[in-house]
Amino acid sequence: MSGKMPLLLLAIVQSLLLAGGQVLLKFALVRMLPFSMTLAFWKSVFLNWQFAACGLCYGAGSLLWFHIIKHYPFSMAYPLVSLSYVFGMIAAIVFFHEQVDFLKWTGVLLIMAGCYLIAR
């Protein structure tokens, strides 16, 4: 298991970057004006720090993903991306104050169990 632990740790960091990018994108979209081909709209996009930070998270996550799929079996690496769903559920509660019912928590636990089995 020690040889595969780095994959799990890398997958956790990559999933955190993906989920963080999604959270920042949601915050950015709330601050943006409705879509239009106007200067005001494009200013609301490109002067939005959450949008820029979202791009940085996605960029870093992509670079990390390049490393992961180059050095680890795809059949192990790709399913571990589903950890981003776990972090997304936690972010929904923490940042957006959403209610998560028992069935959704059951799904999250199944994802975590599947990731554990794949990383073994």
Image (tube, grey):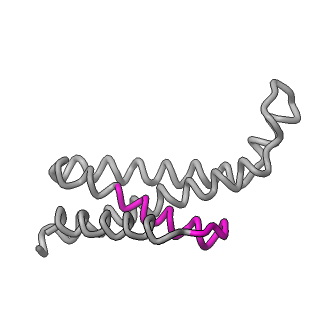
* Residue at image point 74% right, 42% down: 46
Magenta span main SS:
helix
Residue 112, position in %: x, y? 31, 68
Q: Nearer the viewer, residue 1 or 94?
A: 94
The answer to whether residue 98 is magenta is yes
The answer to whether residue 56 is magenta is no
Q: Could you say which quadrant of the image residue 39 lies in?
A: top right
Residue 86, position in %: x, y? 42, 65
User: In the image, 96: left or right of 69?
Assistant: right
* Residue at image point 22% right, 69% down: 116
Image quadrant containing the C terminus? bottom left
Q: Which residues are magenta?
A: 82-99
Residue 56 against residue 11 in the figure, above or below: above
Q: Could you say which quadrant of the image residue 49 lies in?
A: bottom right
Residue 96 against residue 27 in the figure, above or below: below
Residue 83, position in %: x, y? 37, 62
Residue at the extreme top? 37
* Residue at image point 26% right, 53% down: 79
Residue 109, position in %: x, y? 34, 70
User: In the image, 53: left or right of 34?
Assistant: left
Image quadrant containing the N terminus? bottom left
Q: Nearer the viewer, residue 86 or 47?
A: 86
